[in-house]
Image (cartoon, rainbow, N blue to C red):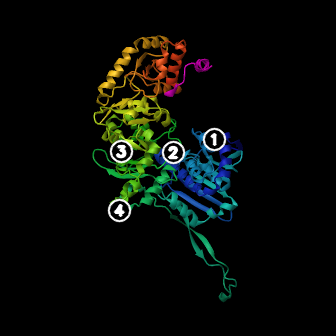
Amino acid sequence: MSKQTHAFQAEVAQLLHLVTHALYSNQEIFLRELVSNASDACDKLRFEALNNTALYEDAPDLQVRLSFDKAAKTLTITDNGIGMTAQEAIDHLGTIAKSGTKDFMSKLSGDQKSDAQLIGQFGVGFYSGFIVADKITVESRRAGAPAAEGVRWISGGTGDFEVEAIHRAERGTSVILHLREDALDYANTWKLKEIVGKYSDHISLPILMEKEEWKDGDLIDPSNEEAGRQPGGMVKTGEWDTINQASALWTRAKKDITDEQYADFYKQISRDFEAPLTWTHNRVEGSTEYTQLLYIPSKAPQDLWNRDKKAGIKLYVKRVFIMDDAEALMPSYLRFVKGVVDSADLPLNVSRELLQESRDVKAIREGNTRRVLSMLEDLAKHDKSPEATDGVTDVLSEEDKAKLGQYTQFYAEFGAVLKEGLGEDFGNKDRLAKLLRFASTTSDTALVSLADYKARMKEGQDAMYYITADTLAAAENSPQLEVFKKKGIEVLLMTDRVDEWALNFLHDFDGTPLQSVAKGAVDLGKLQDEAEKKATEEAAENFKPLLAKLKEALKDKAEDVRVTSRLVDSPACLVVTDDGMSMQLARMLKQAGQQAPESKPVLEVNPEHALVKKLDGSVHFHDLAHILFDQALLAEGGLPADPAAYVKRVNALLS
């Protein structure tokens, strides 16, 4: 193939501009990304060679090599992994196929830490080389291809790149960075070893660098040693040293691993600059044998809610890398968990399809789920603010002190995802219910657990009450809470979009039913005295003619109209039947483009409110009835079916 010039995909060109102009303050991440890519290339070769050992050619030992040339101002990262064909070089280095790239570019903010995190997270790590290089040359040959089918790719990181055929004896890829003047520090053995130790120490194949030794300068006068020598310097010896641990962290004994090493390994596999919140490392033995090293991040990733993003943990079989994002090893509601599973039982040629059907995989998945829930339960058990533990912290272990407040931090990031488990994992529903936290009408700042709520229920209270709404303000100010506030009955305020769906699977907690205050007629049981019940019954009887007129006027909008005791200050509110779909859930389904069952709400009116009392006999009865309904709809977060008609009616009455 003769030399060809290709234009970058538009998104790549935009990305390169951002990388070269916005991320100088985090220069060293480029080496982490390129070494990671080299390691991935070796893992891919190892996997493909399971069915074709000839791909190893005459070099079965996989490795990554770092070398530099100060005179030429180059730094080279070489692997003997799977390599690329010419077309693959064009496809992989000139375009970005991964979904989420536009999202990545929109989130580049100039914030050093978050920008560096995003680079790895969205799989565009190769381009980070342009942070330190004004030109990159890539030379590669696909494993198994003849030497004449090598390829050279060159770009200055602007609008285009060149590709040409070369002769390359070795399989694999060399990425040659032509360093900028302000990045020449990276042509330095000590600097490169420091960065590898920081980011890539636990990559499970050796990272090699050529040894250097000090050599005295030549004699100024060979015939006179006393005349002295020229300045000496470091010279390369031709021997190569391994500069990383080159062993998988999870295979070592826990006692031999420091917290710092655990945190560094997490950062390597997750491309996260933040330390993890907590982790668990175990060797599981029995009918299924495997090692698990699982981490809970301290911050939610940018793409947590991206349904196109594959989530899961890294799968190894007998220390051979099989796949990233093995979603079968972790339930969807725990998709934020990062880590590694190394199985001793699965076949090396396991596929994603086989993972779905394997009994061993099911056992690993259940074991992983139990471990993660145990970690969360441990964090929740110790979750107290420092102020709440004054005088007690001195008797806590250092490990327990470190857990104070961590569950609150976790729940703020991942609580909404955890709730999905109520509908996905029936076997652990009770454990998950104990981990849930909600705002409530009696707690201004701290979230409360269902156990806390139950422990402080009023004597005679038969149900745990909750309300769902789009926002906390909408929930707190809902008319449906008025009687509960009057009587001092705590109500849980649920404002996550997943709450409506999740509560369909949680009907009670520890034997006590959960009751939506927006469903069915209000029944406070023993909390409502006989006088109140009698007054409500009498009002219902006295208002029968008015209720009938309202029902007729609103027959196209309301399923029924009735008197209620739940209202104190408001004239009316809307509720649904006990077995009906809530109005909020119906709205959410419609917003998502899904079909919601057609149903009409029940209008409940407050017989003590002046507006309701004035309805009977009013010449504006029809307009007032519709305004009453539409205002009740507005109060619970909905919109009138005909906003213009609502405005017209209000204006007519005001004028």
- Measured Cα–Cα span from mark 3 to mark 4: 28 Å
Looking at the image, do the residues carrying marks 2 and 4 touch, with CB atoms under 8 Å apart? no
Q: Earlier in the sequence, mark 2 or mark 4?
A: 2
Q: Position of residue 522 (x, y in %)?
A: 36, 25
Could you tell me how far apart the alpha carbons at marks 3 and 1 are, in whole angstroms?
A: 40 Å
Q: Secondary structure at mark 3?
A: helix
Q: Which residue is mark 2?
A: 301
Label 2 Cα crowd, 10 Å radius (few <14 / some 14-19 / many 20+): some
Name the N-terminal-most of marks 3 and 2: 2
Disc nearer the start of the sequence (2/1): 1
The numbered mark at residue 373 is 3
Provide residue 526's location: percent of width, then percent of height: 28, 29
Mark 3 and mark 2: Cα distance apart in space? 20 Å
In 3D space, how far apart are the residues under numbered discs 2 and 4 (Cα atoms)? 35 Å
Mark with earlier residue (3, 4): 3
Q: Badge 4 is on which residue?
A: 394
Magenta span of residues: 634-655
For discs 3 and 1, the disc positioned in front in the rendered view: 3
Structural crowding at the residue carrying mark 3, measured as other residues with C-alpha within 10 Å and reported as few (<14), some (14–19) or many (≥20): some
